[in-house]
Amino acid sequence: MAVRYEWRGPVSNPEVNALHAEAFGTRVFDESEWDWADLVHRHSLGWVVARDGAALAGFANVLWDGLVHAWLQDVMVATGARRQGIGTELIRNAREGARAAGCEYLHVDFEGHLSRFYFGACGFTPTNAGLLALQ
Ligand SMILES: CC(C)(COP(=O)(O)OP(=O)(O)OC[C@H]1O[C@@H](n2cnc3c(N)ncnc32)[C@H](O)[C@@H]1OP(=O)(O)O)[C@@H](O)C(=O)NCCC(=O)NCCS
């Protein structure tokens, strides 16, 4: 079955929390701790849901400044579904969603080992970026 991608598609908290734990090696948060459905509706420009049948194969969150800048966060593909182009397609859908909303730039930051994914497969260009830990 072909993987389906949906901008602002329906997604449940337990399935995103399970995918997040798998992707980032965290414990599985429950929805009282991390209520994705509520948070993305209140704070995101959009999000991309990838489904292989009923199963959640991937997810990407797109935040924004309300005008021209959008940022990727929580790009994740299920372990058993990696290296099949799903991550690239998530980003392509995120890019189209942000562009359709009038954004001019899509930002991302990532660890060095993902350079081939973001620069090679997804078409990002290198830039300087910075980060301050607030806690
Ligand atoms: C990063 C991630 C989203 C990539 O998803 P994916 O569906 O496997 O990516 P794709 O199949 O579209 O990869 C396309 C190309 O990107 C590169 N790439 C993908 N994952 C890579 C990795 N882990 N290391 C190095 N290159 C990678 C490869 O060139 C790949 O092409 P190839 O498979 O023909 O070699 C996925 O590995 C993931 O969920 N990782 C854990 C969470 C994470 O780190 N997210 C990113 C936070 S910034």
Image: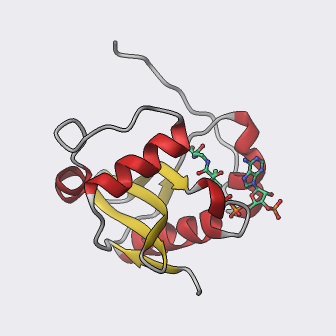
Q: Nearer the viewer, residue 96 or 54?
A: 54
Q: Nearer the viewer, residue 119 or 32?
A: 32
Q: Locate residue 115 relative to residue 9 in the image: left or right.
A: right
Where residue 124 sits: x, y (%)? 66, 56
Quadrant location, ligand no. 1: bottom right
Quadrant in which the N terminus appears: bottom right
**From the viewer's perspective, is residue 99 above or below residue 18?**
below
Where residue 76 sits: x, y (%)? 53, 53
Q: How is the image coloured?
A: secondary structure
On the question of residue 27 being in view, the answer is yes
Name the quadrant containing residue 101.
Answer: bottom left
Where residue 2 sits: x, y (%)? 59, 86
Name the quadrant containing residue 104.
Answer: bottom left
Q: Nearer the viewer, residue 65 or 47?
A: 47
Q: Locate residue 58 relative to residue 98 in the image: left or right.
A: right
Q: Residue at x 40, y 78 (%)?
A: 6
